[in-house]
Amino acid sequence: MPINPVHRRDWIGYQLRLRNLSFRAIARQEGVSHQAVCAAARGSSSRPLQEALAAALGLTPQALFPELYDEAGQRLGSTRAPQRSTPPAAATCPLSPPATLPEAALPYTRIEESVFRHATS
């Protein structure tokens, strides 16, 4: 059985075909999309779908996805670091507004105030 997730997905698909099954058949049985089953076959974190795939092949999830389990057979937590395209909000957004307005904003504030006074009088 291949360890590479892409090759393992192909291997699982082949093994399912030998048993007259498919990713779509497993998806219908589990009530999910076939894409979700394909992702589980690559080793995504869908434990129930991985268990369904393993059961369809007559294997244990530990045998089918050994990288997701420790030597005692316990499922490991997430081993991937979160993928972020932007820094966390706390790093880019100040917690409170600046105490004073920049000089460039003052003339606009005065103009808006004078227009407001004329409009309400």
Image (spheres, rainbow, N blue to C red):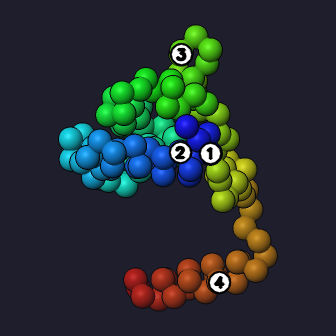
* Disc 4, SS: helix
Q: Mark 3 vs mark 4: give the one in front.
A: 3
Q: Position of residue 121 (x, y in %)?
A: 41, 85
* Residue 53 higher or lower than 107, as above or below: above
Q: Position of residue 71 (x, y in %)?
A: 62, 14
Are the residues tagged 2 and 1 within 8 Å (C-beta)?
yes
Is 112 or 3 nearer to us in this picture? 3
Please tell me whether mark 2 or mark 4 is closer to you in this view. 2
On the image, numbered disc 2 is attached to which residue? 8
Q: Amino acid at mark 1?
A: Asn
Q: Give the class, few, some or many, for how many residues have Cα within 10 Å of label 3's Cα (few <14, many ≥20).
A: few
Nearer to us in this view, 53 or 75? 53
Q: Residue 74: which disc?
A: 3
Q: Nearer the viewer, mark 2 or mark 3?
A: 2
Of circles 4 and 1, the one toward us is 1
Q: CA distance from mark 3 to mark 4?
A: 64 Å
Hey, what amino acid is under mark 4?
A: Tyr
Question: Helix, strand, or loop for circle 1?
Answer: loop
> Which residue is most to the front?
18
In primary-sequence order, the first of circles 2 and 4 is: 2
Q: Measure how far apart labels 2 and 1 are at the Cα level.
A: 6 Å
**Residue highlighted by disc 1:** 4
Tags 4 and 1 in contact by the CB under 8 Å rule? no
Count every numbered label the image shows and give the total: 4
Q: Which mark is residue 108?
A: 4
